[in-house]
Structures are given as structure tokens and as C-alpha cells.
Amino acid sequence: MTKPSAPNTGAFFAQAAVSFAVALAAVAIGVAFLPVNGWVRGFLALGLLYTVTSAFTLAKCIRDRQEDSYLVNRVDQARLDKLLAEHDPFKEAV
């Protein structure tokens, strides 16, 4: 039976979090210092917020789908293991 992949290390998680923070800060600073009026800046800030929340939602949906398929695969593998354990190739056919 296959086991799930090993969890991410703390260093990988930290790198991903820092990378996300730097990217978000860079775009937020870029929007803040654009030479446009407040309405345009506000619109771009809301667009940035929408993009970030959509990315989190998409990542959660992908993770949930992967976890669901893992559970289904485990059930199917358990059924197959049971069938193979009960099968005797040398048993006479009736």
C-alpha cells in the first residue's frame, strides 16, 4: 500500500511564507506609490486583495481534492489487498 508523501520541512514552509510576504509587500508598495489618484489606487488594492484571497481558496480546494482522492485510493487498495489475500491460485475450480 502506498503511503502519503512526507510532510514539508519547516525550512520549506518558512521559505514559502517569506516568498509570499515579499511578493505581497512588493505589489502593495508598488500600488501605494503609483502616480495615480486615490480611486485608482483603491481599485488596484482591492484587486490585489481579491487575487490573494482567491489564491488561498484555490490552494485549499486543490488540497481537499487531493486528500479525497487519497482516501478513495486507500479504500480501493484495501479491497484489492483483501481480494489478493483470499485468492488461492492452486485451489481446484468447482
Image: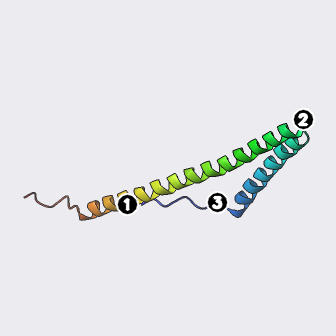
29 or 69: which is nearer to us? 29
Crowd around label 3: few <14 · some 14–19 · many ≥20 (10 Å): few
Give the mark, 3 or 2, whose residue is nearer the N terminus: 3
Which image quadrant: the N terminus? bottom left
Q: Distance between the residues labelled 3 and 2?
A: 42 Å
Give residue 73's position: percent from left, percent from top. Answer: 41, 56
Give the mark, 1 or 3, whose residue is nearer the N terminus: 3
Residue at the image position 20 percent from the left and 58 percent from the top? 89
31 or 2: which is nearer to us? 31
Looking at numbered disc 2 in the image, what kind of residue is underneath it? Val
The circle drawn on residue 75 is 1
Q: Name the residue under label 2.
A: 36
The circle drawn on residue 8 is 3
Residue at the image position 56 percent from the left and 51 percent from the top? 61
Q: Is 54 situated above or below 67?
A: above
Looking at numbered disc 1 in the image, what kind of residue is underneath it? Val
Q: What element carries label 1?
A: helix
Give residue 77's position: percent from left, percent from top. Answer: 37, 58
Give residue 88's position: percent from left, percent from top. Answer: 20, 61
Disc 1 versus disc 3: nearer the observer: 1
